[in-house]
Amino acid sequence: MNMHRTVAQSRQRGMSFIGLIVMGVLVVSIFAIGGQSLPIFMEYQAIHKAANKAAHEGTTVPEVRAIFDRAGAIDNISSVKGQDLEVTKNGDKIVVSYKYAREVPLVGPAYLVYRFHGQTQ
């Protein structure tokens, strides 16, 4: 009886080597995808900021697009150009809408696709 008790107590607990490898692959994958995704989200913030600036400072459609393009040149925006914007008027306010997609290549033919759309208020 006493021997059975010591065998049960000395049993090791923790992660196996295979579990450690799988966990390592998951962590590396998350960091790799996150590293490629972070600039995409930073560009989205820059696009939103430039669209708000253009909507508040511009009075005509060509002016709004030109203001956006100038802000895009400063912030290095490559996904959206001024000609891609949809500029409308809501009462006395100018509303700028944008819509675009960015892809992150994963493995082989697999891609992670981000689709963004937004508008100023």
Image: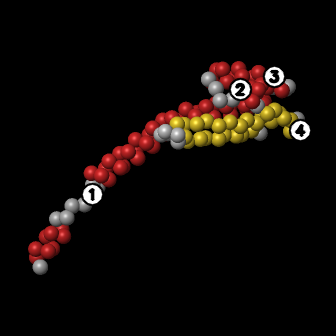
Q: 109 left or right of 60?
A: left
- Disc 2 packing (10 Å; few <14; some 14–19; many ≥20): some
Q: Nearer the viewer, residue 75 or 79?
A: 79
Residue 86 placement: quadrant: top right
Which badge, 4 or 1, is on the more N-terminal residue? 1
Cα distance in 3D space between marks 4 and 3? 18 Å
Q: Residue at x 19, y 64 (%)?
A: 11
Q: Which residue is label 4 attached to? A: 91
> Can you give x and y, in whole percent of width and height, for residue 77 in the image?
64, 26
Instruction: For label 3, count other residues whose C-alpha is less than 10 Å away and answer few (under 14), some (14-19) or many (20+).
Output: some
| Residue 63's disc number | 3
Image height of 91 relative to 74, above or below? below
Q: CA distance from mark 1 to mark 2?
A: 53 Å
Mark yes or no: residue 37 visible: no
Q: CA distance from mark 3 to mark 2?
A: 13 Å
Say what amino acid the circle numbered 4 marks. Answer: Gly
- Quadrant of the image for the N terminus? bottom left
The amino acid at mark 2 is Lys
Q: CA distance from mark 3 to mark 1?
A: 64 Å
Q: Amino acid at mark 1?
A: Gly
Q: Distance of mark 4 from mark 1, alpha carbons? A: 64 Å
Which residue lies under the disc numbered 2? 81
Check the picture and name the quadrant holding the C terminus.
top right
Determine the residue positioned at 80% across, 36% down: 95
Left or right position of 90 against 44? right
Give the number of the mark in front: 3 or 1: 1
Q: Secondary structure at mark 1?
A: loop
**C-alpha distance separating marks 2 and 4:** 25 Å
Up the image or down, 70 lies above or below 52; here it is above
Q: Which residue is the site of mark 1?
A: 14
Query: Is there CB contact under 8 Å for labels 1 and 2?
Result: no
